[in-house]
Amino acid sequence: MRAGKEPARDQIELSEVMYALSDPVRLEIVAFLAQRGEQPCSTCCVDMPKSSLSHHYKVLRETGVISTRIEGTRHYNSLRSDDLNTRFPGLLGSVVEAIHNRH
Amino acid sequence: MRAGKEPARDQIELSEVMYALSDPVRLEIVAFLAQRGEQPCSTCCVDMPKSSLSHHYKVLRETGVISTRIEGTRHYNSLRSDDLNTRFPGLLGSVVEAIHNRH
């Protein structure tokens, strides 16, 4: 089962993906998922209130950056790498590299 | 002479560049400058009020995406390709390709 609304591949908009990536916390989440693959919400590296984190996951999901799978009471998030690489070749890889280069 | 404040190369922030690229008009400006090189403000492809366009150029300039050179009464804009490619290798190219692929 999938959570909330996720745009189909051909409805992912570049400007909306850019907006999703314009926040440092969301960039951390993207870097985390790029490194670890699918993860439950609770394991992300970011130390912040659950409600704030849920908002960031929602933005990433509704813009097509991540997909959320529900299994029982847990939510598992993963990057939509295939969809993003098809829509915008090279973009996700260069963003992830840029996130790592910041540190 | 340079217009307004432009961040030094090492002060260009990924999240701020992403924000600058989260607007369809600003993406059009980036695609236009990528194709044409340095251009006066007035020649951009976007048909909109001058004040709105000035705002978009300001966002692009203050986040480090473009540089504005003043010569007499004219403002010339260009992408900061070298700075962006040094800070975030491959990012600008993949964004420009993604803009073209939208159409």
Image: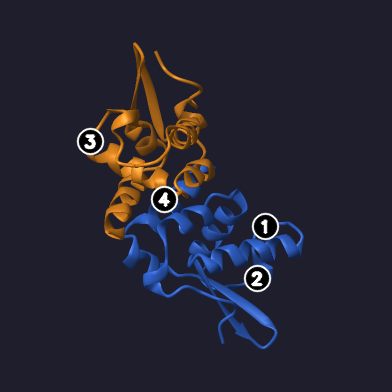
Chain colours: A orange, B blue
- Pick the residue in front: B62 or B2: B62
Q: Which residue is mark 3?
A: A36
Q: Quadrant of residue B72?
A: bottom right
Q: Badge 2: few (under 14), some or many (20 or more) residues near its Cα, within 10 Å?
A: some
**Pointer 3 or 4: first along the chain:** 4
Determine the CA span between mark 1 and mark 3: 41 Å
The chain that hosts pointer 2 is: B
Q: Badge 1: few (under 14), some or many (20 or more) residues near its Cα, within 10 Å?
A: some
**Residue type, numbered disc 1:** Val
Q: Secondary structure at mark 1?
A: loop
Q: Secondary structure at mark 3?
A: helix
**Residue type, numbered disc 2:** Cys
Q: Which residue is mark 1?
A: B46
Of marks 4 and 2, the one in the foreground: 4
Which quarter shows the C terminus of chain A? bottom left
The location of residue B22, given as percent across then percent down, is: 54, 49
Q: Which residue is mark 2?
A: B41
Determine the CA span between mark 2 and mark 1: 10 Å
Determine the CA span between mark 4 and mark 2: 31 Å
**Residue type, numbered disc 4:** Pro
Which quarter shows the N terminus of chain A? top left
The chain that hosts pointer 1 is: B
The location of residue B56, given as percent across then percent down, is: 63, 61
| In the image, residue A13 above or below residue A8 | below
**Pointer 2 or 1: first along the chain:** 2
Q: Which residue is mark 4?
A: A24
Say whether mark 3 and mark 1 are on the same chain.
no
Residue A29 lies left or right of residue B15; in this view the side is left
Residue ID at (61%, 65%): B57
**Residue type, numbered disc 3:** Arg
| In the image, residue B71 above or below residue B31 | below
